[in-house]
Amino acid sequence: MEKPIPIGTTVVMERTGETMEEMYVNMGPQHPSTHGVLRLMLKLDGEYIIDCIPYIGYLHRCHEKIGENRNYTQIIPYTDRLDYLASMSMNFGYVLAVERLMGQKIPERAEYMRVILAELQRIASHLIWLGTFGLDLGNFTIFMYCFREREMVLDLFESVTGQRLNYSFYRIGGMPMDFPDTFLTDCQAFLAWFKPRLPEYDAIMTDNILFQKRVQGVGISPPQVAVEYGLSGPMLRACGIKWDLRRNEPYSIYDRFEFDIPVFDTCDVWARYMVRRREMEESVKIVEQALAQLPPGEVMAKMPKTIKPPAGQIYSRAESPRGEIGFYIVSDGSPKPYRYKVRSPAYVNLSALPEMLKGCLVADCVAVLGSVDIVLGEVDR
Amino acid sequence: MTPEEILEQLKQKFGDAITESEVKGVEVRLTVKPEQSWEVCRLVRDIGFEYLNCISGADWMTHLEVVYDLSSLQHPNKAHLRVPVDRDNPVVRTVTDIWRGANWHERECYDLFGVRFDGHPDLRRILLPEDWAGYPLRKDYTDERLVPYTDYGMEEKVAKAEGEKAAPKEARSLQPPTPTKPATA
């Protein structure tokens, strides 16, 4: 068991030089702004946080052990449950890893379908982040707006996959079925609706002086710290480092599209907000281009009935909405992986939280934690 | 710098510590003795692999293995370091002083494989409760709640289907198959 904290320990406070009792505040695991079950022990000096100890694992579901006892196809539905707000991206990362291990090529049309769905998923994931982040900071309106648009993306996904949250739609070797006939027009209608909504979010959030004061200069993670901790995704790009796996290590067909990588260099919560806000625009661009180029043809490659990758190992990574999702797979040539490991982006991003919280006010803790965009399903696996 | 040059540079300095090496595409793959893993890691960092992707473990029954996946934000090369450690007394020096992000990765490896990282600032279980017994990702770990893999006769079915496809059409009569019929043609 963890060591109990001795009550009544007196310490000299660094900031004021006063001698006083050391104070710990326990945040979570049942706290609405931890977005799941995360427990933070905050060590305080008056109103300032001087240290933070995260406790995770409340949602541990033995993902890797189960994976090692299932065959390659059976793992796909489990990957949905990693990051349940971006199931498509998790599926994508996993099937990509197995296909790279097998050296499997997939049909053109399936590649386009994957990119379209993954980018729509990125929009949906950033929307839910924006909504709940606004809610954390006391802005209820943006929450309703974002969930309205996210609902439309989920409707699109429902028309394609039949599911609204855990799709399991990617297969090793392609996609199980083609888009329904209505999808292209529906998707274009959604994009036409969604693009004018982004300035509305700006009017509520970005241009809101209260919001700006709340997030600027808070939760600083300098670029040096970001690289040492291995932060990825919007967290890294908010530190002024232009790094996106879609651009720097293009997988699937991402090298065929024109899009920008939004980068902000203020390293604070504001920068993370702006990066995600801008990324939605870029995802819209990618979806539009992919819809225009969508070729006809097959969506599934010819695959053996039991998938047995050749003996070997691979660390394969892809860009999920939260950062670098990596799969380390060791195959011994049998139908199930010998070793299956997930490097989840939120786990690594969360490990740098104590660094960001040091020196913050208690009231800013929720803003900083919200800006990390954690999904506990993925952190605890 | 090409992966071959990186490998050459590493071999010059730590020729004895590197037991196996391979270049695969842009990836340098090394197997390093545990006694000198920290020194090799530091050199790898100084060569330009400043970004730690992942630390994972693997249980090979004869020994455990700690696997470091490294890359860089400046160049496309990657490094893949494997450090075999003794199964009964798995100890390897921590790399938290080289990459700070190694902290949670090493805690996870300790939690699930029981590898002890010498010099780690806070080596506690991270995903499992503190009082959990055993290391679940070791291959000999048993738990009655764990459902083992079964292929439900899939291998056999596939072989049979392929055999039937290969056999000529008239061989498939309406008669029930005789028990002596072989599963594969």
Image (cartoon, rainbow, N blue to C red):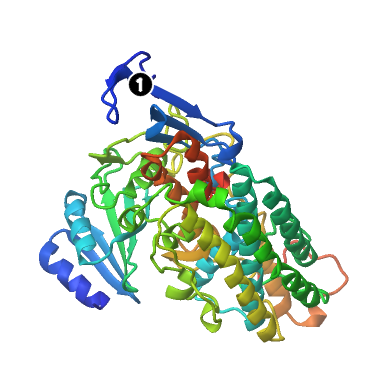
Residue nearest the viewer, comparing B71 with A98: B71
In the image: residue A352, left or right of residue B35: right
Q: Badge 1 local density, few (<14 within 10 Å), some, or many (20+)?
A: some
**Which residue lies most toward the front here?**
A209
Quarter of the image with the N terminus of chain B in it: bottom left
Per the image, the residue denoted by label 1 is: A22
Q: Is A194 situated above or below A45?
A: below
In the image: residue A271, left or right of residue A227: right
Whole-percent x, y for residue A285 in the image: 62, 76
Q: Can residue A323 be seen in this view?
A: yes
Whole-percent x, y for residue A377 in the image: 57, 46
Whole-percent x, y for residue A243 in the image: 42, 68
The residue that appears at 55% across and 31% down in the rendered structure is A29
Numbered disc 1: secondary structure: loop
Q: What residue type is labelled 1?
A: Glu
Q: Is A325 situated above or below B7?
A: above
Quadrant in the rendering for residue A1: top left
Quarter of the image with the C terminus of chain B in it: bottom right
Q: Can residue B182 be seen in this view?
A: no
Whole-percent x, y for residue B125 in the image: 40, 34
The residue that appears at 48% across and 40% down in the rendered structure is A364
Quadrant in the rendering for residue A236: bottom left
Residue nearest the viewer, comparing A134 with B58: A134
Q: Is B184 situated above or below A147?
A: below
